[in-house]
Amino acid sequence: MADDLTEQLAALDTCAVSDALDQLGLTGVALGLSCLTGPARAAGRVLTVRLIEAAGAGPSRQHLGTAAVEAAGPGDVIVVDNGGRAGVSGWGGTLALAAVRRGVRAVIVDGACRDVDESRELGLPVFARAAVPLTARGRVAEEDWNVPVRICGVAVTPGDYVIADGSGVVFVPAARAEEVVAAASRIAERERLMADQVRQGVPVSQVMGASYETMLRERS
């Protein structure tokens, strides 16, 4: 079940969270991913899957992703390390259906996925590098799940937080999540006030003056 911090994160957007990471000297933006199932927003705790080339995997005991789906709970986000492979799927329609039945909020794939139309019809946001029809069978296999992975160069650990929307995907280390969410909330509030000023007719050059350029240096 989603915790309070997840709900606070879900009320933000990736841009505010990215700015908060910058302010705190942290990294977490996974460049190159976008939502393939239409406009969507999602936030939750991470449950990971790591894939490798099938030739080096040995006999497969289970299809990739199935263990993570069966372990997932409402509010989780399944994150698949497909090694950035854009020519082979690391996620598909039957997995999407099973994930929705478990209450999974979204799926993030560093690489390609398939059955995008099915995921869209199910209402499951899928963020990935590309969509392809090529099956994973005989091409990639699950090496492990619920283990540390790297997504677009970002180190991600099970239990970390993630937020994804039209601007991209941002991971937040669990150990710093409360601090990041607090900083992002302050940034979002400041930008809301700036937007109010623009609506009131204040020149945008004044609203986005010298203080805007240095606002991420401020911690309060």
Image (cartoon, helix red, strand yellow):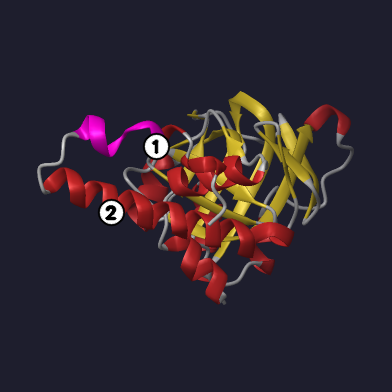
Q: Nearer the viewer, residue 163 or 58?
A: 163
Q: Which residue is mark 2?
A: 193
Image x and y of residue 166, in percent: 37, 41
Which image quadrant is residue 110 in? top right
Q: Earlier in the sequence, mark 1 or mark 2?
A: 2
Magenta residues span: 204-211
**Under tag 2, what secondary structure?**
helix
Give the side of residue 118 with respect to residue 158, left or right. Answer: left
The N terminus lies in which quarter of the figure?
A: bottom right
Q: Which residue is mark 1?
A: 212
Q: Amino acid at mark 2?
A: Leu
Q: Amino acid at mark 1?
A: Tyr
Query: How dense is the environment of label 2, judged by Cα within 10 Å: few (below 14), some, or many (20 and up)?
Result: few
User: CA gap, disc 1 to disc 2?
Assistant: 12 Å
Query: How dense is the environment of label 1, judged by Cα within 10 Å: few (below 14), some, or many (20 and up)?
Result: few
Say which residue appears at 64% left-offset and 26% top-offset: 85
Image x and y of residue 138, in percent: 72, 31
Which image quadrant is residue 176 in? bottom right
